[in-house]
Amino acid sequence: MEVGGVVVQGWGKAAADVGGGGFLTCSSLLSEHFLLQEKSECHYTNGMQRVRYLKRLIWGQQEICYYDSDLGFSVARTELGRPIAEYWNSKEQFLIGQSRRRCVFCVWAPLPRCLSLTHTVKPRVKISTLKAESSHRPSLLVCSATGFYPSEIATKWFKNGQEETAGVVSRELLHNGDWTFQIQVTLETKPRWGDVYTCQVEHISLQTPITMQWVAQPDSGKSKMFIGIGGFVLGLSFMVLGLLVYQKNKKAAADRPLFPRPPRLGWQKS
C-alpha cells in the first residue's frame, strides 16, 4: 500500500533532498536529464500485527536504494544507489526521521508510543493457577506474556524438564489498544507434590528466553487432614505412655507396707 510519494525532477546539475534533513548532491551520480522519485510505502501483515515501512528511491524506472523499517537501515539496489544508502546509514537523524515517518504514515499512533514500537518491546511474564472444582479433574496453569511487540512469540510449557505439548488446551493472542500484544497459554495437568513446571518465552526483543517456574505444593485440604491425623496419633502416644507410667507407679506403691518397720537396735534380740 503506497501512502505517500515525492517526485523530484530537474535538468543539469541539481541537489535533491533525499530524506533525513540532509541534502545529497546528485550531480555526480545522475545524468543531465533525470527523474528522481521518492516513494513511501506501508506493508501490513495479519491486519496490523506487523507494520513495515519502506522508503524507496527510484531513478527513471529502476529502484536504486531503499530504507526498510524491519532492517532499521538502508540497502543499495544498484551501484548508483550505493553511495546514497551509505550516506543515509551514516546519518543518525535520518534513521530517527524514518522511525517518525513510519508512525506518521503507517501506524497512526501517538508519536511517543509509536516510537517505542519502532523496534521491539520485551514481554512481561507470569504464571497463574486455576484450581479445578473437582479433585478428579486436572488443574489449569496459565502462562501470560503481556505488553510485547511485534506479535511473533514462542511460549512453551515444561514439566520437570520435559516439554508438555498434549496438555496445552488453549493459546490465545490478543491485540492491546496501544499496539502491543498479549498471549495466554493454558496447560491442563494434574500436578503432584514437588513437580516443577516451567514456562519459557522466546521473543525477538530478548537475547535469552524468559523462564518462570511454578512448584506444585501439597493440597491444603489433604495437608490439614494429615496434620490432624498426625496430631491425634502423637496425642494418643503420649496418653498411652502416661497410663503406663501411672500403672507402674501405682503397682510400686501397692507393694510398699503402709507403716514401715522401725530399724532394729543392736541390743535387741531377734
Image: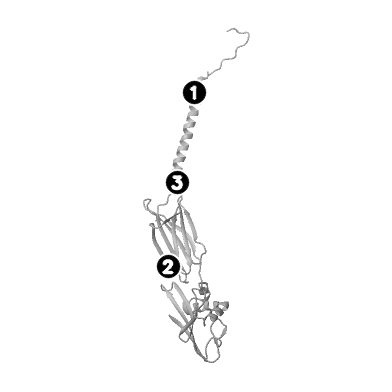
Q: In front here: 166 or 22?
A: 22
Which of the two residues, 17 or 253, is positioned nearer the viewer here?
Answer: 17
Q: Which amino acid type is shown beneath numbered disc 2?
A: Leu
Residue at mark 1: 251
- The kind of residue tagged 1 is Lys
Residue at image x 40%, y 63%?
171
Q: Amino acid at mark 3?
A: Ser
Q: Which residue is mark 2?
A: 174
Give me the C-alpha separation between circle 2 and circle 3: 39 Å
From this view, report whether residue 21 is shown above or below residue 132. below
Tag nearer the camera, 2 or 3:
2
Marks 1,2: beta carbons within 8 A: no
Q: Quadrant of the C terminus?
A: top right
Q: Nearer the viewer, residue 216 or 256?
A: 216
Q: Position of residue 28 (x, y in %)?
A: 56, 87
Within the image, what quadrant is residue 172 found in? bottom left
Labels 1 and 2: the sequence-earlier one = 2
| Foreground disc of the pair 1, 3 | 3
Give me the C-alpha separation between circle 1 and circle 2. 81 Å
Give the number of marks: 3
